[in-house]
Image: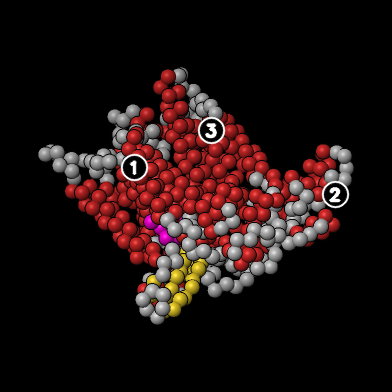
Amino acid sequence: MAVTDSPYQAYETSEAGESLPPTRSVRDRVIPPMRGSVLWGWIGPLLVTAFGGLLRFMNLGYPKAVVFDETYYMKDAFSLITWGVERVTIKDADKAILAGNTNIWQSCTQETLDKCASYVVHPPLGKWMIGVGEWLFGLNPIGWRISAAVIGTLSILILARVARRMTRSTLLGCFAGLLLALDGLHFVLSRTALLDIFLMFWVLAAFACLVVDRDQARERLVTWYENSPVSPQGPWLGARPWRIAAGVCLAFAMSVKWSGLAFAVAFAIMSLLWDFGARRAVGLRHPYAGAFNKDVPQGVLAFGIVPFVAYMATWIGWFGTDTGYGRNWERATSADNPLFFLFDSMRSWIQYQWQVFSFHSDLETSHPYMSEPWQWPLLLRPVAFFYEGKQNACGVKDCSEAVLGVGTPVIWFGAVAALVALIAWYVSTRDWRAGAVLLAYAMGWLPWFYFAIADNRTMFLFYAIPMVPFMVLAITLCAGLLIGPSTRTAEGLVSARRTWGAAIVGAYALLALINFWWLHPILTAELIPYTEWKARMLFEKRWI
């Protein structure tokens, strides 16, 4: 996309549209036009996604080891696709798996089924997703990591497209996708069978669905305004499938980890506030009453009923078998009454959920790589997912192979500055983009302070992965402000501000690429001299 394209006319409007030039139409005020080629709007993000995917799939099966918490999730995933629920494995199951043995289940009889059920503390969806890869490629490192690689790659495409929609710029959409592709923490989690990359994906997908729904709802509202008699409250906007899809995605986020609940509540409120703003922007006499009467009922469906049904559907393996932890199948089937089966099954399920909640509330076990939420934005305590020292294997005596769960510092430190700028921008303009990004980032970060203070809970840097797409969006929005709108001099030359802004943004992207390249050996377990491994530790005392 040419640098002379102008995505930033959109930044000249407020959510309410009160300070807009009188010459602009209601349509342009409420729905800023998308500039640039539709074809390149797909080709550009797809090329960036292909680049990110190439990085993530390359040598995916290495290290041929069970990395960090893969020991839990890859076995639970295999159990789900084998038995429908998580079951207890034999001692040294990891060694057996790496040796090619998949018969890893603890023996039990019909009378001891309850002892074979594994007590797990996260909902099943993320493990089902890992299990798809194991079903396709077997119980091996590629099999249990490939789903994470696919999901991580798809998230690059989603972010590039949603950034394009928010900024009305293909160039900035590709910029956002590139930054996500180059983030070290996103990269490592896309190559590891942990749950957090799946949580991030469904949160980002829900956000993207709501941004599309926002545009479509405004399009329908403006079309009504232009072609129908104006009423004080405005029309019902019809079926909103993207809002329903967002509800499903939020349910799936909660079905990976319960921390998705904070996003579900916040995004529901945000979407309804967007409805209020849309009706106000077209000048309706009673916009809030219209939103409550016309939009809120469907919001209850999208953010209440649909997520509940979708969340419960992910537990179908537990409800449909007799070997799940706390299932109590015999009592549930003791009466020849479907209602009793349903009631008793729900009672057992709720009791199980309460046990899980209690577990998380009391999780205070110390760990050498644990960190506090305030440390995350500055990368003060990364997580060593894998480390192995070797002798005389890399041309020198001491060699290292490491997978360090850490973000790319140029991106993370730049995001801190961008988020501060977004706060000032939102306070001064009430721009919906800044507000949406700040809200999403806050929901990925602030709730953890409660657990840190109230429960002293064990936490890790990779819990911050749902924040990363919104950190990138914050940088992207600020990049757009630096570049500015498309203006030319009387001689037809591009303005100096736009030239310098584009140069700064391009230089920043290049720095992110260099920073990622520098970290790449310790993100992929590349065999390097110990001195080179140590040189890549940003804060030596905290990173080692």
Of callouts 2 and 3, the N-terminal one: 3
Task: Give the alpha-carbon distance from disc 1 to disc 3, as whole Å.
Answer: 26 Å
Q: Is residue 166 left or right of residue 239?
A: left
Q: Nearer the viewer, mark 1 or mark 3?
A: 1
Q: Residue type at mark 3?
A: Pro
Image side of residue 403 versus residue 414, left or right: right
> Which SS class for mark 3?
helix
Q: Please tell me which residue is depicted at 18% across the width and 48% down the height of the picture.
A: 496
Q: Position of residue 98 (x, y in %)?
A: 58, 63
Q: x, y (%) of residue 153?
A: 45, 49
Mark 1 in CB contact with mark 2 (< 8 angstroms): no
Residue at coordinates 63% horizontally, 41% vertically from top-left?
A: 310
- Residue at mark 1: 44
Boundaries of the magenta span: 182-186
Mark positioned earlier in the residue sequence (1 or 3): 1
Residue 398 is situated, as x and y percent measured from the top left of the image, at 41, 79
Left-right relation of 543 to 251: left
SS for dot 2: helix
Q: Give the residue at mark 3.
A: 241
Residue 21: % across, % down: 30, 34
Residue 107 vs residue 192, the one in the foreground: 107
Cα separation, mark 1 vs mark 2, equals 57 Å
**Residue at left offset 43%, top offset 64%:** 523
For the residue pair 413 and 328, the one nearer the viewer reads as: 328
Vertically, is 392 above or below 441?
below
Looking at the image, residue 71 sits to the left or right of residue 424; the answer is right
Q: Which residue is mark 2?
A: 331
Crowding around mark 1 (Cα neighbors within 10 Å: few <14, some 14 to 19, many 20+) is many
Mark 1 element type:
helix
Query: Gap between marks 2 and 3, in whole Å?
Result: 40 Å
Q: Which is in the foreground here, disc 2 or disc 3?
A: 2
